[in-house]
Amino acid sequence: MRGVVKRFGPITAVDGLDLEVPEGSCVGLLGPNGAGKSTTMRMLTAQAIADEGELEVLGRRLPEDSKQARAECGVVPQLDNLDVTLTVEQNLIVFAFLYRLGRGERRAAVDRALEIANLTDRADTRVDKLSGGMRRRLLIARALVHRPRLVLLDEPTVGLDPQVRQELWALIDRLRSEGTSVLMSTHYIEEAERLADEVTIMSHGKAVARGAPMALIEEHAGREAVEIYGSPARLAEVEAEARAAGHATRRTGTSIAVLRLNGDAPEGERRPANLEDVFVLLTGEEIA
Amino acid sequence: MSGKVGRLERPALLGVLMREVINFSSYWRSTTFSATVEPTIYLLAFGFGFGSLVSTVGGYDYVEFVGTGTVATAVLFSSAFAAMFGTFIKYKFQRTYDAILAAPVDTEELVTAEAAWIAFRAGVYGCVPMLVAIVFGLAPAWGMLLVPFFGAIAGFGWACFGILASAMASSIENFNYIISAGLTPLFLVAGTFFPLTQLPDWAQNLAQLNPLYHLVQLVRHAAFGFDAWADVGHVAVLVGFGVLMWRLAIWRLQTRLVD
């Protein structure tokens, strides 16, 4: 997408966004709530129509050829919209129909999706009897029934336990290794860092940085950070000194992190710089 | 998929329809119960309650009169209500439409398939009061075989009306206005329980605009003998109502679902 703008009344949700997902790669869209990530996702399925700019998905121009594009995309929504009174298998069958699989292909596609989600032995369980993690896995499997070329994941692990999140990461990683292109929005830094080949950091509807996670960290935060703890007065002092020495700093609540070190680091706890440092530096926003 | 795609594609309609059919397997009992028992209660209550006071209306046995009239009631209840509540729940609470529109399905196909499914059900459920009336003495007639089709045509219009209403409602409480001010008067002033000739002229003229009235007339004629040109007119009104509601429902739902 190029120069895409989307307004809702006086609010500009997406403000001149450029975004590209190279074939076979996983791109992370990282940003706080309200940065325009979900709106971006909805525009890719023509469920929101851009006011300006050009969108192309799998070689189809949007919105006019969106239906053909949608046929080759899988969408995992942020909010669970499974049919809860149906069984796991029935949910998958419905999507096999919606994505136009032929009579002969449906059975195998459903079995394959069950296997991907590791829900084969739950095929006959009603969705409202599943745990939160199983429902999420089903939601992802449902998006894969028709072997899409591009998968759009909107906050795939929001609100889940750490171990469930890791299960889903393995699932998403498997997709990418099988050559499916993935666009994933998230506000979990770790998720983007682990899964994405390339990250676009969004803030207020704009892309403020893009690149491979490691490259972004090196470019904007340096290799290492030093965390300095102390009283608020001491922290303010450290902050002023570090800035004077040409370092970047960020407050983390209880400490000051000094970034972009170049040999002359102040005393403190050393740790590798991370994507969160980059994010805060670039957007001035703290996120969880 | 390659090249330009048409509107109202069969695979898209089939997909939405299959979703409804598979879902129906999980709730058919309650739906069938309410769609058939309620009109039957009206039929029995009015048929026997009133029937003991008035033996004939417009030349028919009162049970026969009400038994044919409540077919329209059953069609209305099983289409307008199902569409209103079903659409609202799917769109607002379950977000089903988000999932469907992310698939290669357009709003037009979504509305058409859902309304067609409700119309089919309405055609079937609509026959129940007539069958009950047959048990109580309504004479079977060949014309009655057309009743499911009349019911389905009207049901399609009412289903689209329900989808339109839910696309315009901001909360489910808004349905109270539509039901009290819209559907209840239409249901009472359709010639179901008493002939419209009992009403003042202005009300009789207004009733001509009520699709339910035209359905009631068609069902009575199917049971007691067709009146060719008048019945073509009644069918035309129902088809017109259906087409109008269909387009309006698609238009409103589209603005609701696509930002």
Image (cartoon, rainbow, N blue to C red):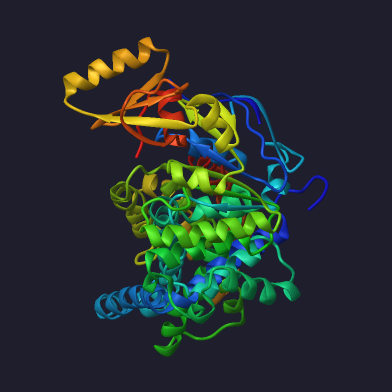
B15 to A2, vertically: above or below: below
Residue B149, horizontal then vertical, whole percent: 60, 69
Relative side of A255 to A97, left or right = left
Tell me where residue B148 sits by quadrant: bottom right
- Please tell me which residue is depicted at 24% across the width and 15% down the height of the picture: A237
Q: Is residue A250 left or right of residue B159?
A: left
A164 to the left or right of B239: left
Task: Point out residue A200 in the picture as x, y percentages from the top left corner.
Answer: 56, 33
The answer to whether residue B97 is above or below residue B132 is above
Asked whether residue A78 is in view, the answer is yes
Report the front residue among A68 and A247.
A247
Please, which residue is most extreme toward the right here? B3
Q: Is residue A163 above or below residue A13?
A: below
Q: How many marks?
A: 0
Report the side of B96 relative to A158 (left or right): right
- From the top left corner, tell me how far across and down residue B2 is, in percent: 82, 50
The front one of B233 and B116 is B116
* Above or below, comparing residue B230 to residue A94 in the picture: above
The residue closer to the viewer here, A127 or A234, is A234
